Amino acid sequence: MLCLYLKELYVDWVYKTILYSEVHKAVTHVTTQHIFSLKDRFIKEALFYFYYFFIREIIGGIFMVDPQIKKLAEILVNHSTKVKKGDKVRISGDALAGPLIKEVYRLCVKRGAITSVKTGLEGISYIFFKNAQKHQIEHYPKISEIEAKENDVFINIGADYNTRELSNVDHKKIAVRSKVTNPISKIILGKRWVGV
């Protein structure tokens, strides 16, 4: 209820900001003292709204988590993968899924897991498959294999910017790369993992 009230106040403030010059023109017949008090009131209201939204967005964004994100993170950590103290957990996902990745990470750390995070950027896969040469596509990522063997839990959080990103690249390249990395996928699928 308070949020709705403050939202209405914010809309009212924006409206006042847009129409301030018109209001100022309309009250020119009023005394100078009255105009200054109107300006003072407007400035005080503007500062209130600025500080309110600054605190809400900056400070609140750090400490407050959307309840749905919190619930999903709890399901991923507590139910789907049953993370426990000492587990080596690998969280991977796209930057767009940042809030969920951070909440999953927080829960894993609180449980005492050794946790690492790997985030991807929009367009990286497209750049690779569009420009990679044969030797790059057929290269076996030994480091990824070592990571797959060393970690106990894998949590993958997908949040693609463009779900059709790879629609206009050579599908043979994608198939070859998938075949090359298949042994790593098998290692991961033999452990506790979840993907959303």
Image: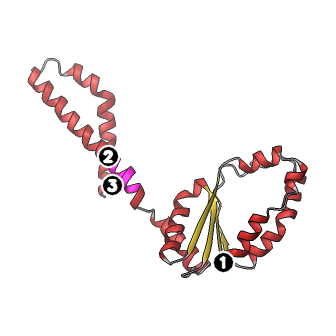
Local secondary structure at mark 2: helix
User: Which residue type carries mark 2?
Assistant: Glu
As drawn, 149 above or below 52: below
Q: Which residue is mark 3?
A: 3
Which mark is nearer the camera, 3 or 2?
3
Residue at screen point 29% across, 45% down: 51
Residue stretch rendered in magenta on the structure: 53-61
Disc number for residue 28: none
As drawn, 166 above or below 110: above
Q: Which residue is mark 2?
A: 8
Q: Which residue is mark 1?
A: 152
Which mark is nearer the camera, 1 or 3?
1
Residue at screen point 47% across, 75% down: 110
Answer left or right for 131 relative to 88. Answer: right
Task: Say which of 181 and 10 sits in front.
Answer: 181
Crowd tier of the residue under label 3, counting other residues whose Cα lies within 10 Å: few below 14, some 14–19, many 20 or above: few
Task: Say which of 114 and 11 sits in front.
Answer: 114
Image quadrant where one finds the C terminus: bottom right
In magenta segment, residue 45: no
**Main SS category, magenta section:** helix
Residue at screen point 18% across, 22% down: 27
Mark 1 and mark 2 in contact (Cβ < 8 Å)? no
Crowd tier of the residue under label 1, counting other residues whose Cα lies within 10 Å: few below 14, some 14–19, many 20 or above: many
Mark 3 and mark 1 in contact (Cβ < 8 Å)? no
